[in-house]
Structures are given as C-alpha cells and as structure tokens.
C-alpha cells in the first residue's frame, strides 16, 4: 500500500528532530550558566553553545572558556576559563595567577580575590580552571581534585545566544 503525500507530514519534524539530536551529540553543546562565576564574560542565566569538535582539532589553551564535567558535580555541565595547562607550574598570590613563575595578565577578571594557592605542577592531561569573577567562583582552588581531566572536557565555548548574543 502506497503512502499518500498528506500521510507523510510527520517525516519532516522527525527528520528535524533527528538532525538536532545528532548535532547536539557530535557537534555542539547547549549549556546554561547557573551562577555569576564567569561574570562579566558570561552573565548569570546565559544560554550558550560550545564546539564539541574543538579539542579534536587542537589542545585547550590558556584563556579558553570551556564546558566540562567534574566528578564532584556529577552530570552538571560547568563553564570556566582554562588557566594552566599540563606541565605548567601554577600558583596564586593575593589573587594573582603565576604560571611558570610569571604573572598572568588577566584583563577579563573584574575583581581579584585575596586567595593564594601553593605552587603546583599541573599533571599530564589535566588543566586548572578558574571563574572570571574570582570572588564568586567555585573552581579549581576549592575542589578536592583541583584539575579538570582531558577526557572531561566537552567543548570550547563559542557564543551566548541569550540574554545577549555574543562571541567568546
């Protein structure tokens, strides 16, 4: 029995849904920013997209805003900035980050905390991540395992689309 054209109306929404699922699984991550830890770069409540393919094409770099999971937070997607790379010596004094003994210039930080962090060598395949709003961020400084492991990185942030569209 042959289907008539008007009986196949459901194929278009089904195809669109399958394409959207495949894009979300393999190309993009859709994420919500639940806190002010990345302000002013990412406002609380922002909706954003991340590129899942970015770390297949290259390694994360200092300054990248990344989406990831961390064992201490279950399946929750977190958003922070990569500060230290594998093999780098990371430390903080009075809220200022030092990499390999050199002060890291961070023009994206609106207010530095008074925190210090001991000199630490970042292990292979691991990263130190911090929020831009250092006085209001639960990040590597406070976690039992202060590192984000390579396999837990989901995407490099591309842009926000709500409440204000913008590239990162």
Image (cartoon, helix red, strand yellow):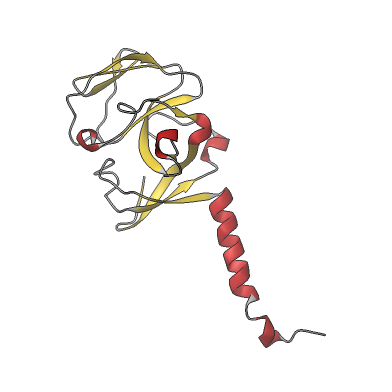
Give whichever of 104, 70 is nearer the camera.
Answer: 70
Q: Position of residue 73 (x, y in %)?
A: 40, 39
Rendering coords of residue 134 (x, y %): 23, 33
Q: Position of residue 51 (x, y in %)?
A: 49, 45
Residue 95 vertical position relative to residue 154 in the rendered view, above or below:
above
Residue 163's place in the image compared with 4, above or below, is above
Q: Residue at x 26, y 30 (%)?
A: 106
**Count of number-bearing discs:** 0
Q: In which quadrant of the rendered image does the C terminus lie? A: top left
Residue 84's x, y, as percent? 38, 24
Residue 75's place in the image compared with 144, above or below, is below
Looking at the image, can residue 66 be seen? no
Q: Residue at x 44, y 40 (%)?
A: 74
Residue drawn 42% across and 18% down? 122
**In what quadrant of the picture does the N terminus appear?**
bottom right
Q: Please report the residue visible at 60 percent of the width from the left and 61 percent of the height from the top.
A: 19
Q: Please indicate, yes or no, whether residue 3 appears anywhere in the rendered image.
A: yes
**141 in relation to 101, above or below:** below
């Amino acid at each position: 029995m042959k289907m008539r054209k008007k009986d196949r109306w459901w194929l278009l929404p089904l195809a669109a849904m399958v394409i959207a699922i495949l894009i979300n699984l393999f190309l993009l991550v859709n994420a919500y920013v639940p806190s002010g830890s990345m302000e002013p770069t990412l406002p609380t409540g922002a909706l954003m997209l991340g590129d899942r393919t970015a770390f297949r094409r290259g390694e994360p770099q200092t300054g990248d805003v990344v989406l990831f999971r961390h064992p201490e937070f279950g399946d929750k997607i977190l958003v922070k900035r990569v500060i230290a790379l594998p093999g780098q010596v990371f430390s903080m004094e009075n809220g200022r980050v030092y990499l390999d003994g050199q002060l890291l210039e961070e023009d994206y930080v609106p207010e530095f905390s008074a925190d210090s962090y001991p000199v630490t060598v970042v292990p292979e395949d691991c990263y130190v991540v911090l929020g831009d709003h250092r006085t209001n961020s639960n990040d590597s400084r406070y976690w039992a395992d202060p590192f984000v492991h390579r396999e837990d990185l989901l995407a490099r942030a591309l842009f926000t689309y709500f409440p204000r569209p913008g590239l990162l």
